């Protein structure tokens, strides 16, 4: 890869996920944006897990090894190395559309007031008949329009930002195993760096198929929230008790916005799963208030 500066650096953390990373890199090799103008930095977060024999890295790509555990530590190591004026983030299980980078670059050119982009994340499913977990994901997962609108944030599965934002507000909090993207976004917003959602800056992401995957994520999110702001034991216990009440209003709002075409049974599934996952998340926060420490999810 050339040592000259690039317009864009694409950063991908990975952890024992070579098969899906290969698909992601294949999609990046087919980008309509000139290869000479962007670089790809893959941050391998398990240095002991060597790249498989015959694994193909694009000519404008590189793999670095990051020993400190956590995807935010991996991203930070790549950011320090990055040569691009713009940083683009995705994950090894994502498949960028062919015009992903070009559309992000053009969006910044056309909207000079925007410092960060929350890109669209399109779910895909194993089969036509959705599992209960997939039904829930269809309504709740990766709603980047809402994340940008309500939280001035974006998940790092599909985010672009000017490098100067990181230069000013600093790197991700690499002590966190979840929620580090939102913690960083709060700092960016507080420093006046705004964000916009773009449907055209799009990647595909597999929906979680099993309930166990949703539970694992909720525990990770609960731990990440607790890591960002420790609450006392009484408040954490109260949150657990409050989570027992089904979130009827919230779920109804999401169903009206994202549940088009769902059956009544599927809508009941969404409500039941959301209530259960809220309880799991709050219970994890409670455990942290009693002294539990964060681990990789």
Image (cartoon, rainbow, N blue to C red):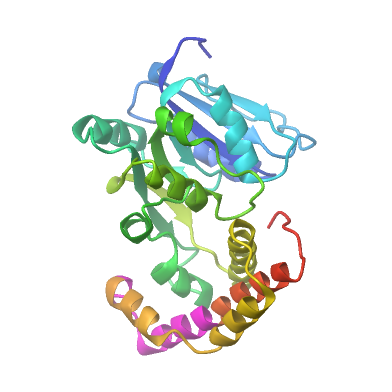
Relative to 239, residue 228 above or below? above
Relative to 295, residue 261 above or below? below
Residue at 64% x, 39% y is 73
**Residue bounds of the magenta highlight:** 258-275
Residue at 57% x, 80% y is 239
Q: Where does the C terminus fall, quadrant-wise? A: bottom right
- Where residue 89 sits in the image (x, y, percent)? 47, 39
Residue 265 within the segment the image draws in magenta: yes
- Where residue 12 sits in the image (x, y, percent)? 55, 37
- Where residue 51 sits in the image (x, y, percent)? 71, 32
Residue at 35% x, 47% y is 119
Q: Residue furthest left?
A: 110
Between 267 and 45, the residue placed more toward the observer is 45
149 displayed left or right of 4: left
- Where residue 170 sits in the image (x, y, percent)? 52, 35
Between 86 and 44, the residue placed more toward the observer is 86
Relative to 186, residue 139 above or below? below
* Residue 251, picture quadrant: bottom left
Residue 256 within the segment the image draws in magenta: no
Main secondary structure of the magenta stretch: helix
């Amino acid at each position: 890869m050339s040592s000259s500066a690039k317009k864009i650096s694409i950063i991908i953390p990975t952890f024992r996920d070579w098969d899906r990373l290969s698909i992601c890199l294949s999609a990046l090799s087919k980008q309509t944006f000139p290869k000479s103008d962007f670089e790809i930095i893959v941050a391998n977060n398990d240095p002991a897990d060597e790249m498989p024999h015959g694994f193909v890295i694009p000519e404008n790509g590189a793999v670095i090894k990051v020993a400190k555990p956590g995807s935010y530590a991996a991203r930070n190591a790549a950011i320090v190395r990055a040569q691009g004026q713009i940083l683009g983030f995705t994950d090894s299980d994502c498949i960028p559309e062919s015009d992903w980078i070009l559309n992000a670059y053009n969006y910044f050119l056309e909207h000079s007031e925007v410092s960060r982009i929350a890109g669209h994340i399109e779910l895909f499913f194993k089969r036509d008949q959705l599992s209960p977990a997939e039904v829930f994901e269809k309504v709740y997962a990766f709603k980047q329009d809402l994340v940008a609108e309500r939280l001035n944030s974006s998940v790092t599965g599909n985010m672009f930002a000017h490098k100067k934002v990181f230069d000013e507000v600093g790197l991700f909090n690499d002590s966190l195993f979840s929620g580090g993207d939102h913690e960083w976004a709060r700092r960016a917003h507080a420093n006046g760096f705004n964000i916009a959602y773009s449907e055209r800056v799009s990647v595909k992401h597999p929906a979680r198929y099993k309930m166990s995957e949703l539970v694992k994520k909720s525990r990770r999110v609960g731990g990440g929230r607790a890591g960002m702001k420790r609450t006392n034991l009484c408040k954490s216990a109260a949150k657990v008790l409050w989570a027992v009440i089904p979130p009827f209003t919230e779920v109804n709002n999401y169903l009206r916005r994202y549940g088009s075409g769902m059956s009544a049974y599927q809508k009941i599934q969404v409500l039941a799963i959301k209530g259960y996952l809220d309880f799991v998340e709050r219970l994890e926060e409670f455990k942290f208030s009693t002294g539990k420490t964060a681990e990789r999810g």
